[in-house]
Image (cartoon, rainbow, N blue to C red):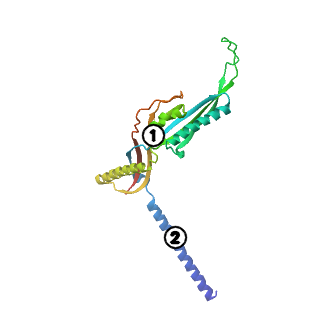
């Protein structure tokens, strides 16, 4: 074999061995680092705590309906839409923005007569259902941001044409800041418990390996008596918004060293 070819072959073998060695070392180091990051499931401990923040509602949601009855569906719809538009116009005059008004129900149902074929009181024959009219219920829900206008709105809805007022629900428009406060409170409790455990025992805690959260945001309800007569509704009692508890429950899992 030519000497130059021998030298070239020798260099190729050396380079191959070096590259292979580097590859094996890199693979070994990678697996070593991966093993360091794996936490033994039997070497962890979890703490659970609840954070609670008391918040005052800033939104009131009120629902009202316009109910119309008639023989022809088209006539009932036209009449109902006209009445509801008058109510919406009244609501807007009180400062309720269009984005805070939504239709939450629109229900047109037929009214049946099951006795139309009876000749007398004693006639008990079966009568196939016969449509004699239609009932249309259109419900709107509004968000009230100025609580001073609640009584004015409730008192004026019937005059404007609403013949059914449901209930009022108080809530918080954007509870995220309160939730964050509750999370911080829960985390502080957990950190304190973890420190006490570590100080009073031989258990030494490492990094946090997992955090889970659960929480509830209860609503405060206030019922208003419904009025379906179409007459002016009675003035409601003074509105008390109350408070809400924003709760966040955290479970934090620590590695045990």
Numbered label attached to residue 24? 2
Q: Secondary structure at mark 2?
A: helix
Q: Nearer the viewer, mark 2 or mark 1?
A: 1
Image point (45%, 58%), residue name? 38
How would you rate the neighbour count of disc 2 (Cα within 10 Å): few for under 14, some for 14-19, many for 20 or more?
few
Q: Is residue 15 visible?
A: yes
Image point (52%, 28%), residue name? 231
- Count how many numbered circles sit on residues in the image: 2
* Mark 2–mark 1 distance (CA, rounded to whole Å): 76 Å
Image point (57%, 37%), residue name? 86
Asked whether 44 or 237 is in front, the reply is 237
Asked whether 94 or 73 is in front, the reply is 94
Q: Say left or right for 46 vs 113.
A: left
Mark toward the start of the polypeptide (2 vs 1): 2
Q: Which residue in the protein does label 1 denote?
A: 149
How would you rate the neighbour count of disc 1 (Cα within 10 Å): few for under 14, some for 14-19, many for 20 or more?
some
Among the 4 quarters of the image, the one containing residue 14: bottom right
Coordinates of residue 222 in the picture (x, y in percent):
44, 35
């Amino acid at each position: 074999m030519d000497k130059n070819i021998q030298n070239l072959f020798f260099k190729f073998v050396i380079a191959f061995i070096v590259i292979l060695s580097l590859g094996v070392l890199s693979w070994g180091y990678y697996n070593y680092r991966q093993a360091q990051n794996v936490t033994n499931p039997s070497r962890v401990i979890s703490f659970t705590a609840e954070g609670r923040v008391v918040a005052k509602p800033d939104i009131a949601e009120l629902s009202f309906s316009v109910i119309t009855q008639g023989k022809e569906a088209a006539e009932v719809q036209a009449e109902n839409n006209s009445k509801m538009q008058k109510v919406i116009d009244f609501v807007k005059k009180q400062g309720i923005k269009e984005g805070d008004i939504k239709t939450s129900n629109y229900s047109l149902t037929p009214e049946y007569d099951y006795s139309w074929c009876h000749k007398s009181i004693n006639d008990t024959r079966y009568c196939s259902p016969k449509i004699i009219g239609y009932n249309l219920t259109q419900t709107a829900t509004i968000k009230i941001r100025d609580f001073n206008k609640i009584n004015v709105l409730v008192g004026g809805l019937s005059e404007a044409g609403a013949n059914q007022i449901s209930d009022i629900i108080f809530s918080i428009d954007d509870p995220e800041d309160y939730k964050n406060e509750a999370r911080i409170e829960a985390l502080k409790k957990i950190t304190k418990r973890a420190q006490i455990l570590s100080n009073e025992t031989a258990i030494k805690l490492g990094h946090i390996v997992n955090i889970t959260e659960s929480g509830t945001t209860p609503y405060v309800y206030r019922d208003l008596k419904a009025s379906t007569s179409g007459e002016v509704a009675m003035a409601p009692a003074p509105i008390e918004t109350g408070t809400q508890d924003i709760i966040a429950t955290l479970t934090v899992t620590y590695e045990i060293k």
